[in-house]
Image: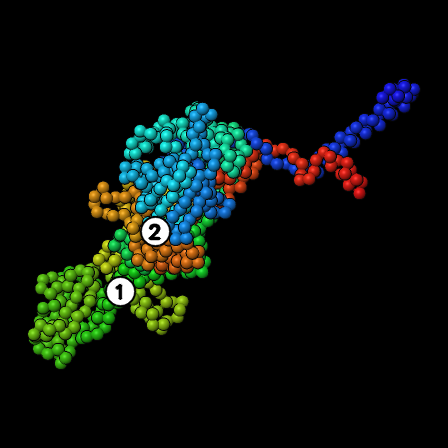
């Protein structure tokens, strides 16, 4: 260094400037090389830290896994604060281990769950460690089996299941019969027994202190619940756990708004938005800086046909309603593209029974017990025509005859004999036609012809009926013309059926309409008449649906219009509140129900179609079950057997075969008309990375992949690389 200084001093001014430039160039080049080396030999990886803030619309209620079945907002929080023995994996669509490992016996009756090591509850401290034990597991599931447990929906999941503690970390569940979907029940978040000491089982749903400060064993711990001017703010912070997976985000903040308009006013402070509504064009209502993710759940919306109603027991009627339901039109109108044909969320393009076909629908309804009035009228006229065409009486079937006038009838005396009568009026020998008889039917008094339809009877002396004739009388010239036109249409129909006239002139029943009791040619502007049965009852179906979501009203109105074209009158019933709707639902107070059902992660159709879940309508309120999910009142011995096989078998081929047979039975029976699987949208800011929801079974399942989410990144050297690799890397930039 000392030797360099004299050399620099000996340089001229310009030589020193040149040297400085060279040194600076070398330094910059070296830094550039170092950066290039660092970028090429390192990679960006997620880094722990950061906060994720999500907005949703709803109402925060109890934060307790026992009582969050119907509240999606609570499910979101509960899914992070609590953890179950098992969990659903959206990537594999299977139930996998979470807090415990699982072993199942070959007969599928015994499930052995062993808690992983190092599990602690959120209220655990160094002075008071609170480990998760088998006692907590026994308590979590055991109380649900008590008759006093205040959640019957959850109670049925563990009915008949024997729960036994093996040791401090091991529990055994013994089933009465194989149930292949049982692991799904073990995803329920565990609760600490210590937090509920002294609380009666029938009051577990009143533990509000616990709900405001819940203690779970999930990846995040509740830090605070704050009510702000705009929202309820729930802050969660990462809880240190030793089990995989490890989460990166330090905090998750759930902001719950009363409505979406309020949420939008604070959108700039949100990283994500749960269940984004869409506009009339189906576009999500969020700014472009948000990335929208659309997804479906294993759900379907359907028209459940109440088979307890006498009119809906007619299979042809049910098939006609299905064929006459234009699902594509409905889906396009409400921007729901995921149409379904079966309760297994499938589209069956191969079977005509699932295709909208107005003509086929009319064909199915034609052979049902419900007929269009014009068909009934035509049948009546054809029967009269057939009766009038045989026998001795030959009269015009329609007459214009004023009151006070008479109708003169004649016939052959040789064929009739003496002592005969027409409508009780004795016939006489014709004064001018030898061998003939004559009778005059009055419009007043005995044997008179009344206005409208008359049945004229020709009888012998002994009272035996020789012939009958149907005759229609009017005093109004316009009515007479309409009656003559009706007779012309009857003849045209007969000629059409016989094929004796050109095809373009032929008419069918659907070309006719009924006006003031008589047939005429249908116009394009004519509404379809309401169908009736043989007793004259009109086909009027009452369609019940929920006040929310709003699109249910739109779907109901479209069904009303589509079925009106089939001759089915639909009365829409939308109760003012969810509570009123639920009461009607439980009582099965509907002919048709527009509603949705969820199959959850196991796609188990048993609760919805097995006859054991039919509502018992005894007239007694105490006999009504909230967990009677068979909304169509459907009962089939074959379907029951298949549903039981699907639940019990552990053989995949046997399950698939049973599912195939079940599809066929439901296809033939038509207990419901399946419409669509709702499409949902979740949106997040672009700086929230690693989001890949997978196949969700619940909205809250998006948080099952939260361990992959991150907002911070750091660079680390690739495998086998370090700063010491710099010298060896230099030659690579020369090549």
Q: Residue at x 36, y 51 (%)?
A: 178
**Picture coordinates of residue 435 (x, y %)?**
13, 80
Nearest to the observer: residue 99 or residue 374: 99
Q: Residue at x 27, y 60 (%)?
A: 369
Inter-mark Cα distance, 2 to 1: 57 Å
Q: Is residue 482 visible?
A: no
Above/below status of 402 relative to 584: below
> Is the residue marked by circle 1 packed among few (<14), some (14-19), or many (20+) residues within 10 Å?
some
> Is the residue marked by circle 2 packed among few (<14), some (14-19), or many (20+) residues within 10 Å?
some
Above/below status of 486 relative to 22: below
Image color mode: rainbow
- What secondary structure is marked by label 2? loop
**Picture coordinates of residue 509 (x, y %)?**
33, 63
- What secondary structure is marked by label 1? helix
Q: Quadrant of residue 640?
A: bottom left
Q: Quadrant of residue 413?
A: bottom left
**Picture coordinates of residue 128 (x, y %)?**
43, 25
First in sequence: mark 2 or mark 1?
2
Which residue reaches farthest front?
167
**Picture coordinates of residue 535 (x, y %)?**
22, 57
Residue that badge 2 annotates: 177
Image quarter hosting the N terminus: top right
Q: Residue at x 12, y 64 (%)?
A: 448
Q: Is residue 400 visible?
A: yes
Describe residue 702's horizontal placement relative to residue 425 as left or right.
right
Residue that badge 1 annotates: 379
Above/below status of 393 relative to 56: below
Q: Which mark is residue 503?
A: none
Q: Residue at x 23, y 44 (%)?
A: 623
**Circle 2 or circle 1, nearest the eye:** 2
Describe residue 10's horizontal placement relative to residue 256 as left or right.
right
């Amino acid at each position: 260094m000392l030797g360099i200084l004299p050399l620099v001093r000996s340089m001229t001014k310009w030589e020193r400037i040149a040297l400085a430039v060279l040194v600076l160039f070398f330094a910059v080049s070296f830094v550039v090389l170092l950066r290039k080396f660092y970028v090429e030999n390192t990679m960006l990886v997620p880094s722990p830290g950061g906060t994720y803030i999500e907005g949703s619309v709803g109402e925060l209620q109890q934060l307790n896994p026992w009582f969050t079945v119907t509240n999606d907002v609570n499910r979101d929080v509960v899914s992070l604060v609590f953890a179950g023995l098992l969990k659903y994996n959206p990537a594999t669509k299977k139930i996998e281990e979470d807090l415990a490992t699982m072993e199942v016996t070959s007969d599928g009756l015994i499930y052995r769950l062993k808690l992983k090591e190092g599990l602690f509850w959120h209220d655990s401290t160094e002075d008071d460690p609170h480990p998760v034990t088998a006692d907590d597991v026994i308590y979590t599931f055991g109380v649900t089996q008590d008759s006093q447990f205040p959640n019957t929906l959850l109670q049925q999941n563990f009915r008949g299941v024997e729960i036994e503690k093996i040791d401090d970390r091991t529990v055994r569940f013994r089933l009465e019969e194989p149930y292949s979907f049982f692991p799904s029940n073990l995803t329920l978040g565990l609760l600490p027994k210590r937090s509920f000491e002294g609380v009666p089982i029938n009051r577990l749903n009143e533990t509000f202190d616990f709900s405001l400060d819940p203690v779970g064993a999930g990846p995040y711990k509740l830090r605070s619940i704050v009510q702000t001017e705009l929202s309820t703010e729930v802050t969660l912070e990462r809880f240190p756990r030793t089990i995989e997976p490890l989460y990166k985000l330090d905090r998750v903040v759930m902001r719950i708004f009363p409505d979406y308009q309020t949420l939008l006013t604070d959108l700039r402070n949100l990283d994500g938005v749960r269940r984004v509504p869409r506009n009339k064009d189906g576009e999500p209502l969020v700014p472009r800086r948000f990335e929208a993710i659309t997804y479906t759940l294993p759900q379907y919306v359907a028209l459940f046909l109440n088979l307890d109603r006498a009119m809906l027991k007619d299979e042809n009627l049910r098939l006609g309603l299905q064929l006459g339901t234009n699902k594509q039109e409905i889906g396009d109108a409400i921007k729901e593209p995921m149409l379904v044909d079966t309760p297994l969320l499938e589209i069956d393009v191969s079977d005509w029974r699932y295709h909208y076909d107005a003509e086929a629908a009319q064909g199915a309804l034609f052979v049902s017990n419900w007929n269009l009035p014009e068909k009934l009228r035509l049948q009546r006229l054809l029967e009269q025509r057939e009766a009038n065409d045989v026998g001795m009486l030959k009269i015009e079937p329609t007459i214009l005859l004023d009151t006070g006038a008479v109708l003169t009838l004649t016939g052959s005396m040789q064929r009739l004999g003496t002592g005969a009568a027409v409508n009780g009026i004795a016939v006489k020998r014709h004064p001018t036609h030898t061998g003939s008889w004559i009778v005059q039917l009055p419009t007043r008094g005995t044997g008179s012809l009344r206005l409208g339809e008359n049945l004229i009877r020709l009888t012998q002396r002994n009272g035996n009926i020789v012939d009958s004739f149907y005759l229609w009388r009017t005093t109004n010239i316009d009515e007479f013309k309409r009656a003559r036109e009706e007779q012309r249409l009857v003849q045209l129909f007969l000629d059409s059926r016989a094929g004796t006239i050109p095809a373009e002139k032929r008419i069918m029943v659907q070309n006719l309409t009924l006006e003031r009791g008589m047939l005429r040619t249908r116009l394009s502007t004519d509404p379809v008449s309401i169908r009736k049965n043989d007793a004259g009852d009109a086909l009027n179906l009452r369609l019940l649906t929920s006040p929310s979501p709003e699109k249910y009203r739109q779907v109901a109105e479209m069904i009303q219009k589509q079925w009106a074209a089939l001759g089915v009158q639909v009365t829409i019933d939308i109760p003012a509140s969810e509570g009123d709707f639920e009461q009607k639902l439980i009582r099965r107070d509907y002919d048709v129900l527009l509603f949705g059902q969820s199959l959850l992660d196991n796609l188990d159709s048993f609760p919805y179609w097995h006859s054991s879940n039919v509502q018992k309508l005894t007239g007694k309120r105490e006999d009504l079950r909230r967990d009677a999910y068979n909304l169509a009142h459907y009962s089939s011995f074959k379907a029951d057997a298949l549903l039981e096989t699907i639940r019990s078998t552990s053989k995949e081929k046997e399950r698939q075969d049973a599912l195939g047979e079940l599809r066929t039975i439901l296809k033939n029976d038509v207990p419901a008309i399946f419409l669509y699987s709702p499409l949902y949208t979740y949106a997040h800011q672009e700086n929230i990375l690693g989001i890949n929801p997978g196949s969700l079974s619940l909205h809250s399942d998006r948080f099952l992949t939260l361990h992959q989410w991150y907002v911070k990144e750091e660079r680390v050297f690739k495998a086998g690389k370090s700063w010491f690799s710099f010298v060896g890397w230099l030659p690579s930039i020369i090549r």
